[in-house]
Image: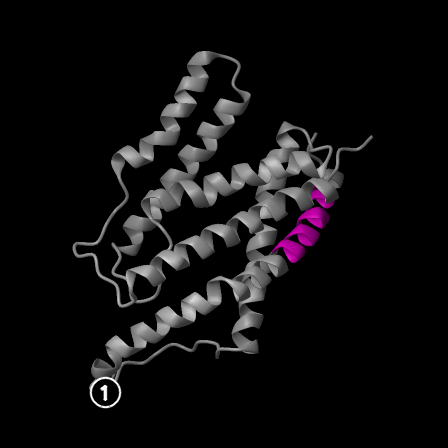
Amino acid sequence: MFNLTTFRELLIAALWTGLLAGLLLTAVQQIQVIPTLLQAEAYEAATTVANAENSHEHHEWQPENGWERTFFTAVANISLGVGFALLLGSVMCLRGRPGSWRIGLLWGLAGYLTFFVAPSLGLPPEVPGTEAAKLADRQSWWLITVLDTGFGLSLLAFALTKTNKFFGAVLLVAPHLISAPQPEVHSSAAPAELAQAFIVATVVANAVFWLAIGGLLGRFYKKES
C-alpha cells in the first residue's frame, strides 16, 4: 500500500540514488563524453566564425569549460537521477519493492531500454552543429516512443495472456514503424567518425547511469522483512 511512510522511504532512497548515480554519470562523462563533445564544439565554432563576425545576435550565458561546466553538469545529472529514481521507484512500489540490488539492476535495464535505447534507435545522440528536425516533432516522437516502450515491456514481463504479450510486442515496434522526424538535409559540422564516437560514449554513459539507478534503488529501497 502506498502511504506517507512508503513515500518517505521512497523519497530518501531516490535522493541517495540520484546523488550517487548523478556523480557517477558525471565522472563517466568526463572520461568519455565531454572530450568528444569539446572536439565537436570546436568544429561547430570553426564553421560559424565567419557568420559571427557579421552577426550581432545575443548569445545566452553558458558555463565556462573546466570546473564551472563540470559543476553545472553534475547538478543537472543529480537532478535527473533523482527524478528518474522517483519514477522508477514508484513503479517498483506498485509491483512490489525489489529485495536486492540484483533485482534493481533489472529495473534499471528496463529504464535504460525505455528512456534511452528505444528513442535512440530513431533519434541517436547528436553532436553540436548537427542539423535536426523541429524540436516539437522530436519531443512528440520521443514521448510516444517512451510510453509505448514502457507499456510494451511491462506487458511482456507481467501480462498473463499471450494476447496481451503480443500487444506488448506491437507497442515496442509501433513508434519505429511511424519513423522518427528527420531534417530535410542531413549535415554536421563534425566528422562522421567523431559523431559515431559520441554516440558510443553516450550509449555507455547512459547504461552506467541507469544500471546504477536500478542497483542503488534495489539497495536503498529494499522490501521490508
Quadrant of the image occupied by residue 189: bottom left
* Residue 143 seen in the current view: yes
**Residue 19 falls inside the magenta stretch:** yes
Q: Give the residue pinned by disc 1.
A: 53
Write the residue at 83% across / 30% down.
225
Q: Residue placed farthest to the front in the image?
A: 193
Tell me the amino acid under the disc marked 1.
Glu
Report the magenta residues as a range.
7-21
Q: Which of these two is toward me, 203 or 20?
A: 203
Q: In this view, does 174 lie above or below 108?
A: above
Q: Where is residue 42 in the image (x, y as percent from the top left)?
A: 35, 75
* Residue 126 seen in the current view: no
Quadrant of the image occupied by residue 62: bottom left
Q: Residue placed farthest to the right in the image?
A: 225
Q: Where is residue 151 in the image (x, y as percent from the top left)?
A: 46, 30
Write the residue at 44% across / 28% down.
152
